[in-house]
Amino acid sequence: MTAADLAAMRRALELATDAAAASEIPVGAVVLDPEGRIVAEGRNDRELTHDPTGHAEVLALRGAAASLGSWNLAGHTLVVTLEPCIMCAGAILQARVGRVVFGAWDDKAGAAGSMYDVLRDRRLPYRTEVVGGLEADASAALLREFFETRR
């Protein structure tokens, strides 16, 4: 883990907090270029847009691709507060993201090592480095608080 990873995770946590304030599941994501600079960010917006693909990771990847003028994000890092799901893992692999750093593990839908390990599956033509657990407690606390207020 790098200082850039930690700074990006702190920004992703801010985005997740913003999502919760907008009644979205609190997940935030940031894409870093190979030098560790933020090139794009996203937060969940499924409720706002009525879009089932409105996950923080997908929105951050779209933003990074648009900013670079290329879908190929090789050498980039995606930092996200929650372990990516299968849909997001597929998008990460399609974008050729080199590293994924995430906060909280998702034992119900995670695809980066908990339920599935899509991002490192040797049967697939592309794999990415995965680092889990950065600021896991803070990420998990945001999710827990969000869902406790809705039960």
Image (spheres, grey):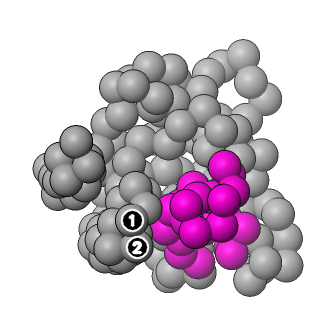
Q: Which residues are magenta?
A: 40-64
Q: Residue 90 is drawn in which quadrant?
A: top right
Q: Residue 98 placed where, x, y %?
A: 60, 52
| Residue placed under numbered mark 2 in the picture | 22
User: Which residue is at 31% across, 36% downward?
Assistant: 105
Left or right of 135, for residue 22? right
59 in relation to 129, above or below: below
Is 49 covered by the magenta stretch? yes
The residue tagged with tag 1: helix, strand or loop? Answer: loop
Is 42 covered by the magenta stretch? yes
Q: Residue 3 placed where, x, y %?
A: 28, 72
Which of the pair 101/26 is nearer the observer? Answer: 26
| Residue placed under numbered mark 1 in the picture | 23
Left or right of 22, for residue 57? right
Q: Residue 11 placed where, x, y %?
A: 34, 76
User: Which residue is at 58% across, 59% downward?
Assistant: 46
Which of the pair 144/149 is nearer the observer? Answer: 149
Q: Residue 34 placed where, x, y %?
A: 57, 71
User: Which residue is at 76% across, 71% downward?
Assistant: 65
Q: Quadrant of the C terminus?
A: top left
Q: How many dots with numbers?
A: 2
* Number of residues whose C-alpha sits closer than 10 Å to that of mark 2, classed few (under 14), some (14–19) or many (20 or more): some
Q: Quadrant of the N terminus?
A: bottom left
Left or right of 150, for residue 113? right
- Residues under labels 1 and 2: Cα distance? 4 Å
Residue extending farthest top: 123
Amino acid type at circle 2 is Ala
Q: Are marks 1 and 2 in contact (CB under 8 Å)?
A: yes
* Number of residues whose C-alpha sits closer than 10 Å to that of mark 1, classed few (under 14), some (14–19) or many (20 or more): some
Q: Residue 6 is drawn in which quadrant?
A: bottom left
Amino acid type at circle 1 is Ser
